[in-house]
Image (cartoon, grey):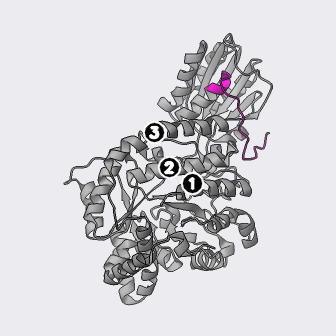
């Protein structure tokens, strides 16, 4: 397995500088280095509560970095530079850019979901995507991407992995996660494999409650941990621990893996020989906060072997509590030094001791560059998959009389409207309507009467997993309308712009196309395929029961 020096190579002189810095830090400063609170990179006046909060975390509590959330391109860069200049030590900035910086940064490049990337069957594209995301991230001042998702989507009812994961097959997940991570780390950048030891074998969202993974250690090693083991062998620089209870690894106790020394230290560090940075999942999630106070959560995570604690519900209380634990001897200073030295070495490797601020002039040249947008479109084009083929003629003839019924799990927005807008630009659409959760049952007869006059019925399905939401569900009225559609003799094309498993909740007699996402590029790819500009050549990376 790669050693820490191999993961974060620095010169002998730089090692000496790290040791010098570590020896000069107070225990208060050392503890602060292990915490990464959240930052919102949107404009705030310097006297605002939000701005004063991040400044105080930086200058008083000496945190080691921040996790950036939703913001704009220039606010990312400006806030990052301001915080770097205020901090006595350079800061590591992290973000959740699984499918590109656009997940959090307006007007930047959006890439398809992981499952779409796997459907393309193209590992080279996965690596190039990783490189593009790392380049944009560094341009914005972000040094660590909480990706790839290395969870195997074992349970089709999983409410939080789903299309964020590459596949339900361990080999596919492992290969694509490695390619994506390799692309990220082709730069001086930190990729993070998550959520160890595997969040796929559950139908519970750890944002809402603590999932319990009920399988043996042998099963875990052979399946759930298989991608993680290969990523560790391949040189992944950090691993995120999931808020998951794994009784077979914890003498049948129901405690989060984040707080388990047996899972973090004994298994990940010692048995799997992982020498990189270990990051907690967000400590403000219910899977961590249930049954644990802020102070208890921080204490248990550090005792378990976690190096970086992200998004504590109250960072100040957490830092103070750990300082007290060290002073009373419950946590040794040697334990703190072990993690802080790793964090400082990572900062040295990233070049932050030499230059911690970014050049804003590079933003216009790098963010949403034409070659990155073209790469995203290419991945999307190659990912669209005909999961069920009922021999409906493609491309669709311009002479067809087409109706479009767009089913959504939210009130329609520009995202859900985009597909219909694109189709109106290509075809003469006879009838179109949004079918949102508020549809009244007395409207069904009118809808059926209208679409029965068309030659082809296209049914886009905009249902996707969201944190804190739970399972993806259609309303009873939506299900009834689909049942009535199925009674018609017209040809039908159902298109999932989200959860591909939605097909298991409905009965259809028509083509079923899975797009694995709802971005505008993905919707454009589907329209390109329907009109014959491209061929649908994706391959399902999961098993669908009805196929």
Q: Which residues are magenta?
A: 528-546
**Quadrant of the frame with the N terminus:** bottom right
**Residue underneath mark 1:** 183
Q: Are marks 2 and 1 in contact (CB under 8 Å)?
A: yes
Please indicate, yes or no, whether residue 437 appears anywhere in the rendered image: no
**Quadrant of the frame with the C terminus:** top right
Query: Can you give x and y, in whole percent of width and height, for residue 176 in the image?
Result: 65, 53
Q: Is residue 541 magenta?
A: yes
Counting other residues with Cα less than 10 Å from the Cα at mark 2, is it few (<14), some (14-19), or many (20 or more)? many
Q: Are marks 3 and 1 in contact (CB under 8 Å)?
A: no
**Residue underneath mark 2:** 133
Q: Earlier in the sequence, mark 3 or mark 2?
A: 2
**Residue underneath mark 3:** 369
What is the chief secondary structure element of the magenta stretch? loop
Query: SS at mark 1?
Result: helix
Position of 205 with respect to 341 (left or right) is: right
């Amino acid at each position: 397995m790669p050693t820490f020096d191999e993961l974060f190579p620095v010169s002998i002189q730089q090692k000496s500088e790290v040791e010098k810095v570590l020896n000069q830090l107070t225990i208060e400063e050392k503890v602060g280095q292990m915490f990464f609170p959240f930052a919102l990179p949107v404009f705030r006046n310097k006297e605002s509560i939000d701005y004063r909060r991040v400044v105080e975390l930086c200058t008083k509590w000496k945190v080691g970095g921040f996790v950036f959330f939703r913001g704009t391109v220039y606010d990312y860069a400006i806030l990052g530079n301001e915080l770097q200049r205020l901090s006595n030590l350079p800061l590591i900035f992290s973000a959740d850019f699984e499918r590109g910086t656009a997940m959090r940064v307006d007007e930047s490049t959006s890439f398809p979901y992981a499952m779409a990337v796997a459907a393309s069957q193209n590992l080279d594209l996965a690596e190039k995507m990783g490189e593009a995301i790392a380049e944009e991230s560094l341009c914005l001042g972000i040094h660590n991407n909480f990706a790839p998702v290395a969870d195997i989507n074992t349970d089709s009812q999983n409410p939080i992995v789903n299309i964020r994961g590459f596949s339900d097959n361990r080999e596919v997940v492992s290969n694509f996660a490695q390619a994506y991570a390799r692309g990220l780390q082709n730069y001086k950048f930190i990729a993070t494999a998550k959520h160890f030891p595997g969040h796929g074998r559950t139908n519970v969202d750890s944002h809402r409650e603590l999932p319990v993974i009920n399988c043996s250690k042998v099963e875990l090693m052979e399946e759930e941990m298989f991608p993680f083991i290969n990523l560790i062998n391949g040189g992944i620089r950090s691993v995120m621990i999931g808020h998951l209870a794994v009784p077979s690894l914890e003498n049948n106790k129901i405690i989060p893996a984040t707080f388990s020394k047996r899972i973090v230290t004994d298994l990940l560090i010692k048995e799997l020989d992982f020498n990189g940075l270990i990051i907690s999942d967000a400590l403000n999630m219910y899977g961590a906060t249930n049954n644990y106070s802020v102070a208890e959560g921080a204490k248990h995570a550090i005792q378990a072997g976690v190096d970086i604690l992200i998004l504590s519900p109250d960072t100040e209380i957490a830092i103070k509590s750990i300082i007290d634990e060290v002073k009373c001897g419950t946590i040794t200073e040697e334990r703190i030094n072990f993690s802080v030295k790793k964090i400082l070495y990572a900062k040295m490797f990233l070049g932050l001791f030499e230059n911690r601020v970014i050049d804003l002039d590079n933003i216009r040249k790098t963010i949403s560059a034409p070659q990155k947008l073209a790469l995203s479109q290419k991945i999307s084009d190659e990912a669209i998959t005909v999961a069920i083929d009922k021999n409906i003629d493609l491309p669709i003839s311009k002479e067809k009389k087409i109706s479009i019924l767009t089913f959504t799990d939210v009130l329609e927005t520009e995202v859900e409207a985009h597909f219909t807008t694109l189709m109106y630009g290509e075809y003469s659409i006879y009838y179109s309507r949004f079918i949102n959760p508020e549809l009244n049952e007395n409207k069904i007869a009118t809808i059926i009467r209208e679409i029965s006059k068309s030659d082809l019925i296209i049914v886009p399905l905009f249902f996707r997993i969201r944190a804190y939401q739970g399972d993806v569900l259609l309303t009873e009225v939506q299900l009834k309308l689909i049942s009535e559609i199925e009674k018609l003799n017209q040809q039908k094309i159902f298109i999932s712009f989200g959860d591909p498993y939605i097909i298991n909740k409905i009965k259809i007699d028509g083509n079923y196309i899975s797009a694995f996402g709802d971005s505008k590029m993905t919707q454009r790819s589907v329209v390109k395929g329907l009109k014959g500009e491209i061929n649908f050549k994706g391959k399902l990376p999961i098993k669908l029961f009805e196929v």
